[in-house]
Image: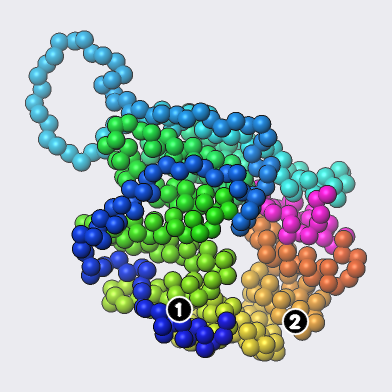
């Protein structure tokens, strides 16, 4: 898209700030529309798991074992402590206690029912490649059992042991007390996050739909509304919205995100404390960033830039200044769309920020020069950055791409291999980095098979669960 077309479209479109949380129009019709949208969101919808083969990031068919049947619908009834055992002792009058804001005691056994979960496969794509291309005596030992009893959660997260985290959260949910609702929701969020990192999108969507089916069947209605509005974590609502994306419905996913954005706006307006207002504003920004990422994946750069521009130019005097990461990200969106002038203005704002480091400035200059096909300037800036930080994977990746445009393949491979050896535990899980390195191996020589097998062997020692092996460009069959 040309610069003139973007500028003309920005001039003709009204200036709408999707992150503006203080509306001047508080009419009854707006409130009724928002209430109607919120009520429609709480209506159950059938899980669209049959169409997962189409759309973005299509999950694998083997995510859910064949022959597995969905769990039967579970109706969760609230059992109050006084209903568990009938007290037949004589009634003694007690003074009336004052009304407090304590959380009522809830007993929801449906949230810990084992039938809500599906079994996790004990194999992954990386093990398939190791069995095919690496000799048995040279294969590194990888634990696919998901044993978690001898590790803590921070260690499992740092080592990308998502299979163990998924099994741990499932076991702890089943063993939890039905009245510990907060802990159960936290474990559910950990379970769904682990399944997502394992690329088991079908299974994550199925279990998420099972969870929300239980929540919508809570009786009585007042308790269900209280659980959904006050106890359900916001992260689980975002995960439930993402089930539309996993089902291959990107526009439905945007609709769900917009409903969450409206909810953040309504809750921020109705909140009384400054802490709650700031919390809902932060959540609105996060949802807006997720929407912008989805729009970029759909190649709608204009809509993504228009969504993020209000964050770059806050109108409220109390609003914090935009971060250099946000300004740099929006500048790259403009570069992808061809609006070099707007990108240059944002990069100039980044360089004028005293908190910006030299490496970020040089990366932005190199990207801007690459957009103008000025490869010499791009190489000079990135070489200056790589000398300052030899093991920086971001600088090494960008420099190798620029060197590829100038024909220096061997030098680009050297920088990328140096970054990989410097921090294999981190870089070994960055799929775009591995894909670019495998591509450089293919372009350098016809005998690239041995180099890619060596890369597979090195990655297998450090990579955690859920790595998409297509980044190594080795066929599985």
Res. 57 in view = yes
Measured from the top left, where is residue 88 in percent x and y? 21, 10
Q: Secondary structure at mark 2?
A: helix
Res. 326 in view = no
Q: How many labels, in total? A: 2
Specify the segment rendered in magenta: 450-477
Read off the residue under disc 1.
355
Give 390 or 415, whichever is nearer the viewer: 415
Q: Secondary structure at mark 1?
A: loop
Viewport quadrant of the N terminus? bottom right
Which residue is at 47% across, 48% downward? 240
Read off the residue under disc 2.
405
Placement of 47 over or under 453, stated as above or below: above
Please report contact status of discs 1 and 2: CB closer than 8 Å, yes or no. Answer: no
Nearer the N terminus, badge 1 or badge 2?
A: 1
Which residue is at 55% across, 68% downward? 296
Q: Main secondary structure of the magenta part?
A: helix
In the figure, is residue 10 to the left or right of 229?
right
Which residue is at 69% across, 54% downward? 468
442 magenta-colored: no
Task: Give the quadrant of residue 57.
Answer: bottom right
Q: On residue 174, which mark appears?
A: none
């Amino acid at each position: 898209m040309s610069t003139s077309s973007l500028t003309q479209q920005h001039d003709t479109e009204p200036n709408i700030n999707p992150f503006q949380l203080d509306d001047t129009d508080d009419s009854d019709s707006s409130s009724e529309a928002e209430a109607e949208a919120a009520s429609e969101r709480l209506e159950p919808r059938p899980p669209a798991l049959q169409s997962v083969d189409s759309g973005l990031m299509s999950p694998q068919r083997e995510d859910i074992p064949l022959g597995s049947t969905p769990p039967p619908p579970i109706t969760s009834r609230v059992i109050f402590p006084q209903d568990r055992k009938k007290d037949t002792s004589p009634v003694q009058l007690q003074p009336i206690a004052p009304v407090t804001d304590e959380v009522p005691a809830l007993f929801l056994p449906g949230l810990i029912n084992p039938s809500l979960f599906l079994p996790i496969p004990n194999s992954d794509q990386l093990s398939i490649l190791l069995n095919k291309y690496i000799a048995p005596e040279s294969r590194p030992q990888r634990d696919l059992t998901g044993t978690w009893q001898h590790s803590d959660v921070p260690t499992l997260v740092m080592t990308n042991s998502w299979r163990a985290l998924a099994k741990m959260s499932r076991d702890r949910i089943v063993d939890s007390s039905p009245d510990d609702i907060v802990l159960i929701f936290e474990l559910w969020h950990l379970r769904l996050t682990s399944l997502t990192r394992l690329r088991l999108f079908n299974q994550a969507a199925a279990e998420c739909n099972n969870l929300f089916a239980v929540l919508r069947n809570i009786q009585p209605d007042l308790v269900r509304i209280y659980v959904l509005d006050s106890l359900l974590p916001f992260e689980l609502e975002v995960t439930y919205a993402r089930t539309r994306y996993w089902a291959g419905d990107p526009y439905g996913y945007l609709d769900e995100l917009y409903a969450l954005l409206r909810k953040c706006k309504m809750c921020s307006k109705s909140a009384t404390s400054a802490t709650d207002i700031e919390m809902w504003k932060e959540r609105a920004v996060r949802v807006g960033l997720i929407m912008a990422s989805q729009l970029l994946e759909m190649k709608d750069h204009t809509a993504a830039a228009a969504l993020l521009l209000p964050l770059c130019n806050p109108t409220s005097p109390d609003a914090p200044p935009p971060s250099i990461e946000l300004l740099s990200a929006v500048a790259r969106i403009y570069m992808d769309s061809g609006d070099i002038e707007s990108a240059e203005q944002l990069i100039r704002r980044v360089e004028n920020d005293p908190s910006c480091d030299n490496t970020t400035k040089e990366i932005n200059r190199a990207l801007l020069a690459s957009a103008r096909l000025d490869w010499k300037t791009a190489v000079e800036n990135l070489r200056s950055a790589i000398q300052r930080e030899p093991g920086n994977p971001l600088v090494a990746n960008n420099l190798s791409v620029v060197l590829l445009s100038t024909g220096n393949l061997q030098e680009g491979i050297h920088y990328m291999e140096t970054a990989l050896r410097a921090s294999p535990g981190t870089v070994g899980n960055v799929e775009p980095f591995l894909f670019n390195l495998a591509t450089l191996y293919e372009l350098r020589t016809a005998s690239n098979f041995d180099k890619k097998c060596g890369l597979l062997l090195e990655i297998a020692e450090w990579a955690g669960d859920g790595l998409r092996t297509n980044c190594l460009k080795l066929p599985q069959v």
